[in-house]
Image: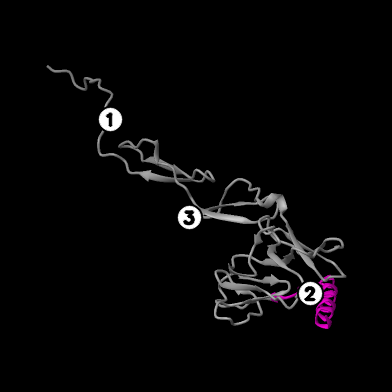
Amino acid sequence: MRSKIFTKAIAVLLAAFMSAGFVPAVLAGGSSPSAAQYTVTASYGTVALPDGTPVTGPVAAGTVVVVTYDSASYPSNEFLYWKSSDGTKIPADTFRLLVDCDAWFFPVFSDLTGSFGDWILLHEGALCTDGDVYYRVDPVTGLIEYKKVYHNSGWHDFGDFEYVDEDHCACTCKVCGYTETEEHYWMEEYVLTEPTHASEGVSRKSCAMCGANIDTVIPRTDEHVYDGTWTIVEPSV
């Protein structure tokens, strides 16, 4: 009982730290500096590498981590499932996670519910696909919940593609400013101006996405094009 009271006291202190901008139980571990780095938060749980090594900082995208519920946190209550900030339920006290974004998890119990305060912004997503993460705390039980609210329903609202360089074009989200770059999609080349023996011609291909054009010179031909009418230059005698 004393252990449980101590655990709940720590939870309330964590809630105060969160209000001041601190993130509770942020667990991770990293590798290649060139890879995107993400954090995994497991309230009342641990996060480790598959070999059991605890991790304590952002992990590289593609890292596999193991999230485990700490049963000492609420020893008298029945763990039901993990729940993520996006609403996903994981009906196991331990699970593996392939990290591809920041993630927050909290335990849900069959015989314990909280009386929570207001939702507080914890993490503001930079992009429409990131979403903002909020948390709320029950100051009595120490329970914590997270939820994610997406900008623009989680979808980018892209404008038109624009020319970037001879190989690429790009479009930008009108809501969050995210820019997506693609290679030009060139349509079939066609002749714009036919060449003659007196002048060069021009062929053109256009990008179906940004409308950019590339014109290519067609060399002059070696053949004369006659109108089919003979003209007497010198009458016969």
Mark 3, Cα crowd under 10 Å, few <14 / some 14-19 / many 20+, is few
Alpha carbon separation for disc pair 3 and 1: 38 Å
Q: Residue lying furthest left in this view?
A: 237
Decide which of 199, 105 is in the foreground and name it: 105
**What numbered label is drawn on residue 225?**
1
Quadrant containing the C terminus is top left
Front label number (2 vs 3):
2
Q: Do the residues labelled 2 and 3 touch (CB within 8 Å)?
A: no
Residue sitting at x 58%, y 55%: 180
Quadrant for residue 181, please give it.
bottom right
Residue sitting at x 36%, y 41%: 200
Q: What's the amino acid at mark 2?
A: Phe
Alpha carbon separation for disc pair 2 and 1: 82 Å
Q: What's the amino acid at mark 1?
A: Val
- Among the two numbered marks 2 and 3 on one chain, the one whose residue lies closer to the N terminus: 2
**Residue linked to disc 2:** 22
- Among the two numbered marks 2 and 1 on one chain, the one whose residue lies closer to the N terminus: 2
Q: Position of residue 155 (x, y in %)?
A: 65, 50
**Residue linked to disc 3:** 167
Q: What's the amino acid at mark 3?
A: Asp
As helix, strand or loop, the secondary structure at mark 2 comes to loop
Mark 1, Cα crowd under 10 Å, few <14 / some 14-19 / many 20+, is few
In the image, the segment drawn in magenta is 1-26
Decide which of 151, 27 is in the foreground and name it: 27
